[in-house]
Amino acid sequence: MADTSIPLEINHLHKSFNGNPVLNGLSLKAQKGDVITLIGASGSGKSTFLRCMNLLEMPDQGELIVHGEAIGFKVDRKGQRQPEDWKQVERIRARLSMVFQNFNLWPHMTLIENVMAAPVHVLKMPKAQAREKGMALLKRVGLSERASYFPTQMSGGQQQRGAIARALAMDPEVMLFDEPTSALDPELVGDVLHVMHELADEGRTMIVVTHEMDFARDVSNHVMFLHQGLIEEQGAPGDILTSPRSERLQQFLAPRY
């Protein structure tokens, strides 16, 4: 019987695109309060692994379990693997909120409307309640005065903090971050990392694809280094980032001048 106390468990995940393998049997177990960072060079499979976790990409093989509930799969007439029950997928996605690299705020909605949308349409929350909750979340990320702004009226850092508020509005059990600072100008990175640091301090379960090695070292409790779709090395950040064993990780962490 699956362990219902574990927010997210992934076993032997495989994914290929046009016959080219991208993920080669990855496994991960996120306990409550874990902050797991996924690091590695571009093309190592980090973002694909993250997107498979909430089925934005459909894994070819492997098992996904959320709080003890395994996602069921079937093979369709074209030989493609699909979920057996899309309602189950919608329910699972509501528990795994994603923060994207390029913010993905809806441009035709104000910031508060962006934050309210999923609670109203997915959770069927009354609009007044969703607005009150959304304003509290915007205040928390330092954006209450930007509630009526459209995304194009805000900086990239403000948009990303707004995207984090939008993800929090679903009360997720696991937050997935796909390189949340990589599209930002350097002076805007700090504000976003500060919010993420606060979420970690609260005990939020987070899985973060990042190139921010200081964040991985200071905030996460487990680091996974991916190389060519495999977990090359993993462990506590103090071990992985200061005394890497594999040659690939040593090369990845080597200073570049």
Image (tube, rainbow, N blue to C red):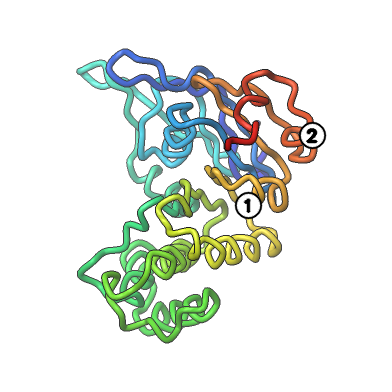
Mark 1–mark 2 CB contact (< 8 Å):
no
The picture quadrant where one finds residue 185 is: bottom left
Q: Above or below — where is 254 with respect to 227?
A: below
Which residue is labeled 2 in the image? 239
Q: Which amino acid does label 1 sit on?
A: Thr
Q: Above or below — where is 187 with respect to 28?
A: below
SS label for mark 2: helix
Q: Which quadrant, please, contains the N terminus?
A: top right
SS label for mark 1: loop
Please name whichever residue, 243 or 33, is drawn nearer the observer in this view of the structure: 243
Q: How crowded is mark 1: few (under 14 residues within 10 Å), some or many (20 or more)?
A: many
Image location (x, y in percent) of residue 29? 64, 35
What residue do we see at 69% from left, 44% from top? Answer: 31
N-terminal-most mark, 1 or 2:
1
Please name whichever residue, 66 or 199, is drawn nearer the observer in this view of the structure: 199
Q: Above or below — where is 128 with respect to 231?
A: below
Which residue is labeled 1 in the image? 205
* Numbered marks: total: 2
